[in-house]
Amino acid sequence: MRPDPSIVSGFRVANVDGGRKHYFDAVEQRCHSWDSFHGEFEVLDRRGFHLVSVCPATGLVLKPPVRGRRIKPN
């Protein structure tokens, strides 16, 4: 379960992919997806490419991009 409040509080839900919600940040044009296994948010660009993994409370970068990781954006 993602923490509340978190960095995605106030973002709109962009789509639900297989039960996984994607939150869209209109200001930065980025999508955030909750990774419940690792307890962090994955940040993706507008085209769905993985950029970084960030801390849910602070937004600090935890891990670098994973090459080849991608979602299909709506």
Image (cartoon, rainbow, N blue to C red):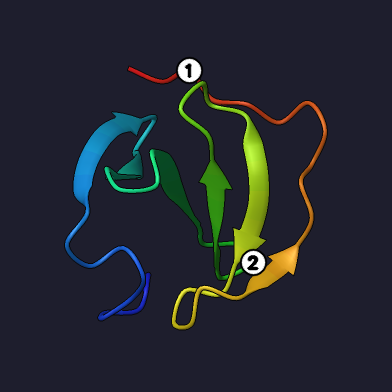
Which residue is nearer to you in this view: 27 or 47? Answer: 27
Coordinates of residue 66 in the picture (x, y in percent): 79, 41
Image position of 41 with respect to 68: above or below? below
Which amino acid does the dot numbered 1 rest on? Lys
| Figure label count | 2
| Drawn side of residue 12 relative to residue 46, left or right | left
Q: Residue at x 31, y 43 (%)?
A: 24
Separation (CA) of disc 2 from disc 1: 21 Å
Query: In the structure shown, which secondary structural element does the residue marked by tag 1 occupy?
Result: loop
Query: In the structure shown, which secondary structural element does the residue marked by tag 2 occupy?
Result: loop
Q: Residue at x 31, y 63 (%)?
A: 8
| Drawn side of residue 68 relative to residue 51, left or right | right
Which residue is nearer to you in this view: 64 or 4? Answer: 64
Coordinates of residue 60 in the picture (x, y in percent): 60, 76
Q: Which residue is mark 1?
A: 72
Which amino acid does the dot numbered 2 rest on? His
Q: Which residue is mark 2?
A: 38
Name the image quarter holding the N terminus.
Answer: bottom left
Coordinates of residue 41 in the picture (x, y in percent): 52, 60
